[in-house]
Amino acid sequence: MPRHVQIPLFQPHPPATAAGEPRYLFFAVRPDAEAEQRIRDLAIRLSDAYGLEGKITDAEQLHMTLCFLGSVSKLPPDAVSAADAAARTLQAEPFPLTFDRVKSFPGSNAFVLCREDDCLPLVQLRNRLLLALARSGRFRPERREFRAHVTLMHDPKLVGLHEVEPVGWTVRELLLLRSHHGLSPYQVLGRYPLERK
């Protein structure tokens, strides 16, 4: 990944827009425009089929979290620059990413698009990123089990694992994002293209 797109870095601790709206910092990959539309169409069909009433995730919010860094208020002041520097060291090629299952996550009520097995290039990219972040000494290791998924909506009605028509895209870049709970879109702090050698 020799080249990267530098996006002006914002202060990591901006004033809160409202009490109780924490911000999170994380790395993610996003579907392309065609996959976005297919995922949205699938979510609408499944919402009707399963009687779900949750708000379907907006197209610009669709993403797959690769590494969650934490709440901005609990991260060191230089967290954004440290994460950016770690991502710049990565080298990886574009790869296909496909999802062919849906299910609910108990506890969070997230209804998600997922896959049965691991995507090796995705796992390798994540492992390289975790290693680069660990070397920075600025982040605690993520302890949650990694389950590749795209959240379609949140709904208290739980749906078991079902197969769906495969939907996917070619992952061509890694994104450093900051979320604002209840607000959209995500703030893009960095883009890191995946390039063939």
Image (cartoon, helix red, strand yellow):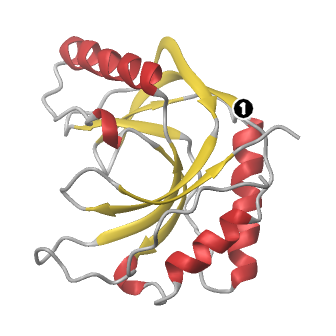
Apparent side of residue 170 relative to residue 159 in the rendered image (left or right): right
Instruction: Tell which residue pokes out farthest to the right in this image.
Output: 197
Check the image and report above or below for 87 versus 171.
below
Place of residue 162 in the rendered image (x, y in percent of width and height, measured from the top left):
44, 18
Q: Looking at the rendering, in which quadrant would you find the C terminus? A: top right
Residue 140 seen in this snapshot: no
Place of residue 182 in the rendered image (x, y in percent of width and height, measured from the top left):
18, 56
Instruction: Tell which residue pokes out farthest to the bottom in this image.
Output: 77
Q: Residue at x 70, y 61 (%)?
A: 129
Place of residue 112 in the rendered image (x, y in percent of width and height, measured from the top left):
39, 34
Q: Which amino acid does label 1 sit on?
A: Phe
Is label 1 in a helix, a strand or a loop?
strand
Number of marks in picture: 1
Q: Classify mark 1: residues with Cα within 10 Å, few (<14), some (14-19) or many (20+).
A: some
Apparent side of residue 94 relative to residue 19 in the rendered image (left or right): right
Q: Mark 1 points at which residue?
A: 95
Apparent side of residue 30 relative to residue 186 in the rendered image (left or right): right
Name the quadrant containing residue 133: bottom right
Most foreground residue, 1 or 65: 1
Most foreground residue, 180 or 114: 180
Apparent side of residue 91 relative to residue 61 in the rendered image (left or right): right
Q: Residue at x 14, y 74 (%)?
A: 17
Q: Residue at x 70, y 34 (%)?
A: 119
Q: Residue at x 12, y 29 (%)?
A: 53
Check the image and report above or below for 8 versus 120.
below
Residue 60 seen in this snapshot: yes
